[in-house]
Every structure is written in structure tokens, then in C-alpha cells.
Image (tube, rainbow, N blue to C red):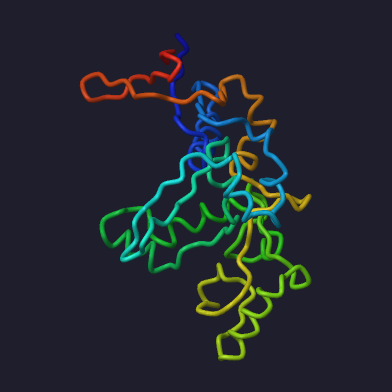
Amino acid sequence: MARGDVVIVGGGTSGAVLAARLSEDPARSVLLLEAGPDDATYPEVVRVPEREYDAILSAAVGVQWGVPVGAASSPTLFYRGEVLGGTSAVNFMATVRGQPDDYDGWAAAGCDGWGWDDVLPAMRRAETDRDFGHQALHGDAGPLTVQRWPEETWAACHRALYDGAVELGVRPVDDINDPMQVPGVGVFPGSVQASGERLSVSQAYLDAEVRARANLTVRCEAPVARVLLEDGRAVGVELRSGEVI
């Protein structure tokens, strides 16, 4: 029976980060289980940002949760990536923060440590912003690289939407992650590699150096069937194959 001090089920947007951060302690063994394939197998439809619409319809997408919305005649589909990196491998790569009032509202409701001033340092540590990394609101040394699409790469529909908004009096902004610049219209930052390819969370946090740690094991194509409980406490998992961890 395989063992680990910490077993993480799902190598998506949260699981990949947890595996990387928790395994920073060499005394703690971490096992990450992902139902889908490794991110090394990403097809072109996933890697190339210009094909983002195709990505959500690709084989990298797992369950398509159909959720009824209002009076709609058919369910609205919410796509989920079943692959290492999770939905960050098939989404539109937008790396957009909430507004300060969102976080301060959580703190006011009793979530200590979740106010804007509390979470901003974590946001800065997480990113390398190629456009505004030198500014106080942003980071320039984090694992998640982000940038904004240059105007010369905009499609005609993007240009029409932007120009139309400005013509109607909406303020143009350079950085929509700067609370002082919004509301307005501008380009959202996306998680993109220096090569121009998509950067999923697993690629950002579980790079070759991290995955070489002796105390970290990443197992793909290992779907979990159930969590094992003892006296209400999770003590292990059982894979669909019957293996117990």
C-alpha cells in the first residue's frame, strides 16, 4: 500500500499549488493524484492560446457540468479540464483579481486574514507580470507569468468592442488589476509562457525542479473512487483500480 504524509486528490488549479508548496518541507512526503494525463501530453489545441475556444471542446476536457440557469431552455455547460493542471489547461487564461471590496467583505464577515491588504502580498508572490511587474501592485519573480495581448494581435471583434466602449465614454485602462483604474475597458492579463504558449498552473508550479524533489510524487491517470474515513477523519483514499493509499 502506497503512503504519504499528505495525499492531494486532483492536480488542478489548487492541487498543483498545494503539492508544490507543501513539498517545500523535505521532511513531509506529498503524493499528488490526478485522474487525467500528465501536462507533458498537452496537445496543440491546449498549448496555443489562439485556439482557446477549441481547447474547451477538446479531449482534455473531462466532465461537462450542465447547470440550469434561470429560464434558459437548456443547461449552461461549465467545462472542467481532466488533466494535470485542471481547468487552467483549457480555460481562457484570464488572470484577473477581485476588487478590494470583495476581499474586505470576506474579512468583515469573519474570515480573518482574507482582507485585501492580507491577500495582496500572496498575489504578488504568485506572479511574474511582464508588463507591470516593477509596480507595487505586482510581482516580478513568481511562478505564474502573465502578460497582456499587444494591440497588434487583437482580432477585429476585440478592436470593435474596445473602440465602441471608448466611444461611449468608458475609460480606457492599461491594467485592470489596478483597483484605481477600474471601472474601464482594457485587455485582461493572461497566463502565458515566454514562448507564447499557454501556462497552466501545473506547468507554473510543478516544473522539473519541483517534480525532482525526493519527497514529492505526482501520479497521473490515477482516478480516486472514494475517501477513506475513520471516526470522521480522512485517513486515505481508494483508487478506481482498487488500490488503497
Instruction: Give percent across and percent down for residue 221.
Output: 55, 25
From the viewer's perspective, is 194 left or right of 162? right
List x then y, in percent, for residue 37.
Answer: 60, 30
Coordinates of residue 207 in the picture (x, y in percent): 67, 35
Q: To which quarter of the image does residue 169 belong?
A: bottom right
Task: Quadrant for the N terminus, please.
Answer: top left
For image coordinates 56% across by 23% down, the residue present is 219
> Going by the image, does 98 lie left or right of 127?
left
Q: Is residue 178 above or below residue 192?
A: below
Q: Is residue 228 left or right of residue 162?
A: left
Q: Residue furthest left?
A: 231
Tell me if residue 47 comes above or below residue 164 in the rendering: above
Where does residue 63 sit, x and y in percent of width and height? 46, 41
* Residue 235 falls left or right of residue 208: left
**Quick check: 4 above or below 60?**
above
Determine the residue located farthest toward the front in the rendered image.
73
Picture residue at 56% right of the left edge, 34% below the top: 20
| Camera-side residue of 163 and 189 | 163
User: Considering the image in quadrants, where does the C terminus appear?
Assistant: top left
Vertical arrangement, residue 184 with respect to residue 24, above or below: below
How many dots with numbers?
0
Q: Residue at x 47, y 12 (%)?
A: 2
What residue do we see at 42% from left, 13% from top? Answer: 242
